[in-house]
Amino acid sequence: MYNFKLLITLLLIFNLSYSQVGINTTSPTASLDVNGNLRVRDIIEETDVATVALVSKDSVLVTSNEIVKSIPSKEIISAVLKTAVKGGFTNATSSTLNLSSTYTDIPFDSESFDLNDEFDVTTNTFTAKQNGIYEVKVQINASASITASTNYGVCILKNGVVEARENFSNITVNVVFPELNLTLVTIPETLLLNLPVTPPVRKAEALLQLNTGDTITFQVFSNLGATVNLSDNIIDSYFTIVQIR
């Protein structure tokens, strides 16, 4: 009789160990299935510095389809991480542009930082990973004077369409030494300098609403029909893209 009672007890313990338990439900679908609110009282805050550092780097609990799951904390941070990108040129070779058409792509091919990994240095294209409002800025600085009196500027494009542009003609001023009549000799009027007075810097900025997958690129606008050398120094020629909300 004793052995029979012991067997029944062991079977009940075994069954409880491996069965699903339901609270406010007769058909649980998980090891513990709570049909209703969950309230936990007197949660003890972890104060051990080493444990806090380990747990915060590990994971947090989230709900998905009413199931509590663990997800790495860095994945949650990445999901809401705002965009911040700054880029420029690798060297002088990449910053030499052949302006054979009115619009010429600017091949920015280096990054100072890219928190969300959204700028492709191969295609020179930024692709948004999340919806939001973005502040976009670009600046280019010609490393040599542009003497031709023609249009020259920089553009910001969203999905291939110009959203912002700064463009104006270059102006040069002729400095002339006037004719002088001296007692013994006359010095004729002489052209001393052909002096460019237009600054070599062009810059543009725009506040854009982007959806996931939208692209940002940059172009030079000009009808020079020549080659222009841009400064490859990051303090002269660069772009920035920052998500503000």
Image: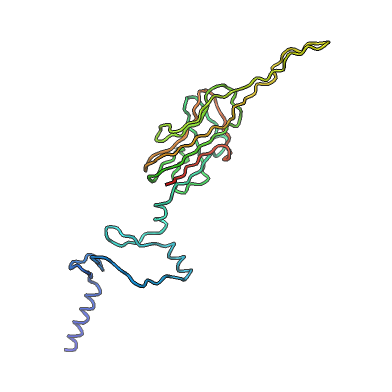
| Residue 60 pos. (x, y %) | 38, 62
| Residue 12 pos. (x, y %) | 20, 78
Report how many numbered discs are placed on residues in the image: 0
Residue at (51% x, 29% y) in the render: 153
Q: Quadrant of the N terminus?
A: bottom left
115 displayed left or right of 175: left
Give the color scheme: rainbow, by chain, secondary structure or one colour.
rainbow
Q: Is 200 situated above or below 76?
A: above
- Residue 229: image quadrant is top right
Q: Is 180 situated above or below 27?
A: above
- Residue 32: image quadrant is bottom left
Judged from this view, the residue extending furthest toward the bottom is 1
| Residue 30 pos. (x, y %) | 24, 66
Viewer-proximal residue among 135 and 85: 135
Judged from this view, the residue extending furthest toward the right is 184
Viewer-proximal residue among 121 and 182: 182
- Residue 177: image quadrant is top right
| Residue 140 pos. (x, y %) | 54, 34
Judged from this view, the residue extending furthest toward the left is 1
Residue at (39% x, 41% y) in the render: 210
Residue at (48% x, 40% y) in the render: 121
Q: Is 18 situated above or below 210?
A: below
